[in-house]
Image (cartoon, helix red, strand yellow):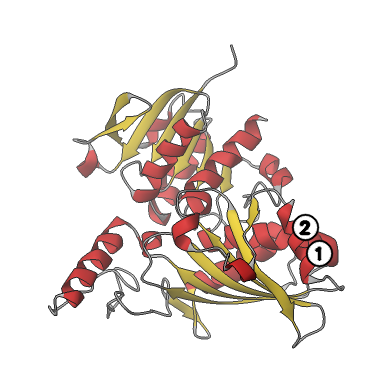
């Protein structure tokens, strides 16, 4: 019998935590025990997984005694408080927050792009930002074939990335707007914002807080994380991140300038054989990736592959993925599977 592992999910009652549990069961991760951890206010809840009922326990340092893998998705503050505690007790922490991503001694891993980095961990492995993950999965094959000079990304990010409350708020705003009633806004651009905006029938060009030079935190995450994951500290990257009234599935309009010539057809073939990528690119048949189709799957879907004639060796791509699955839960589980391999 193959070895089995004690697993904990921190933030198990949240939208990503619940998806992590679902993916662990779906991918038959070899766990012998599963701890569902959350805040004290959730301890009266139970979670069903794989035909079993698990009680929700309060996450404390002692929760990680005997745990082999701890998947964190409870926010940056909890990760900083409890992640090192879990690692000190022998768990491999795979953290979905922004807490450790840019730490020099913490690998930031997308298994299709930089799998070797995972084995350099000292107890903690960081899971990248959702939009960064799908972007680098699409970029890596192009970089390997023709180098990479510049990347320009404009994102169309689903409201599920802002949490369950934001999803429910969008649904209520849609109902109210269509009924001609007043809407309320509390979660977009973020819960602590001095002013919140209606997302229904609208676009909000801000995700997370503004940090420097007019960039918001989400944009800086994409820039810095891409450089770290791909091992290209000098790569020219810029991003504009936009919240759109889509329930699930992030999209990116991606413009790349390569070092060497690569035709759209060659890029299409490279991507067709790239790990984790599904090419959906037949304009004549109106086939291209869309959030409704990508939602529920783990592939990074790429289409609208075409030349950019405004720069030497330029390409345009449209990249769509399920931000809760590949952008968070599945990538985390894939990191653990990689370490077990």
Residue 177 spot, x, y in % from top left: 19, 77
Q: Position of residue 243 (x, y in %)?
A: 41, 72
Q: Residue at x 60, y 41 (%)?
A: 335
- In the picture provided, is 14 more to the left or to the right than 303? left
What is the count of numbered marks? 2
Q: Reply above or below: 127 against 222.
A: above
Q: Are marks 2 and 1 in contact (CB under 8 Å)?
A: yes
Which disc is residue 266 wearing?
Answer: 1
Count neighbours of disc 2 (C-alpha within 10 A) and say few if under 14, some if 14 to 19, many if 20 or more. Answer: some
In this picture, residue 88 sits left or right of residue 121: left
Front position in the image: 229 or 249: 249
Closer to the camera in the image, 317 or 197: 317
Q: Is residue 22 left or right of residue 229?
A: left
Instruction: Please say whether residue 217 is visible from this viewpoint.
Output: yes
Q: Which residue is mark 2?
A: 270
Judging from the image, what secondary structure is the residue with disc 2 in?
helix
- Identify the residue shown where x is 60% and y is 16%: 2
Q: Is residue 123 visible?
A: no
Residue 89 horizontal side relative to residue 152, left or right: left
Q: In the rendered view, would you say 96 is above or below 52?
A: below
Which x, y percent locates residue 311? 77, 85
**On-image quarter of the C terminus:** top right
Q: Residue furthest front?
A: 285
Q: Residue at left 19%, top 75%?
A: 178
């Amino acid at each position: 019998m193959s070895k089995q592992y004690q697993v904990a999910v921190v933030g198990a009652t949240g939208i990503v935590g619940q998806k992590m549990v679902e993916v662990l069961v779906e991918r038959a991760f070899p766990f012998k025990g599963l701890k569902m951890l959350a805040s004290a206010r959730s301890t009266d809840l139970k979670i069903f997984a794989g035909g079993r009922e698990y009680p929700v326990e309060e996450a404390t340092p002692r929760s990680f005694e005997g745990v082999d893998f701890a998947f964190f998705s409870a926010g940056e503050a909890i990760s900083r408080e409890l992640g090192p505690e879990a690692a000190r007790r022998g768990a491999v922490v795979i953290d979905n927050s922004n807490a450790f991503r840019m730490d020099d001694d913490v690998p930031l891993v997308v298994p299709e792009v930089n799998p070797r980095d995972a084995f350099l961990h000292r107890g903690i492995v960081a899971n990248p930002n959702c939009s960064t993950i799908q972007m680098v999965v699409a970029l890596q094959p192009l970089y390997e074939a023709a180098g990479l000079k510049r990347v320009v990304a404009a994102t169309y990010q689903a409201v599920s990335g802002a949490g369950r409350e934001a999803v429910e708020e969008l649904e209520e705003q849609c109902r109210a707007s269509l009924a001609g009633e007043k809407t309320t806004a509390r979660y977009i651009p973020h819960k602590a914002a001095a002013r919140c905006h209606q997302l229904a029938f609208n676009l909000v060009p801000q995700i997370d807080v503004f940090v420097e030079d007019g960039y918001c935190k989400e944009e800086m995450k994409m820039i810095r994380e891409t450089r770290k994951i791909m091992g290209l500290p000098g790569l020219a990257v810029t991003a504009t991140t936009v919240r759109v009234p889509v329930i699930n599935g992030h999209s990116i309009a991606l413009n790349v300038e390569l070092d060497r010539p690569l035709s759209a057809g060659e890029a299409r073939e490279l991507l067709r054989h790239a790990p984790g990528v599904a090419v959906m690119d037949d304009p004549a048949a109106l086939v291209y990736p869309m959030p409704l189709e990508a939602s529920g799957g783990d592939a990074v879907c790429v289409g609208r592959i075409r030349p950019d004639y405004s720069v030497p060796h330029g390409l345009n791509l449209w990249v769509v993925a399920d931000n809760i699955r590949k952008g968070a839960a599945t990538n985390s589980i894939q990191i653990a599977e990689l370490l077990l391999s």
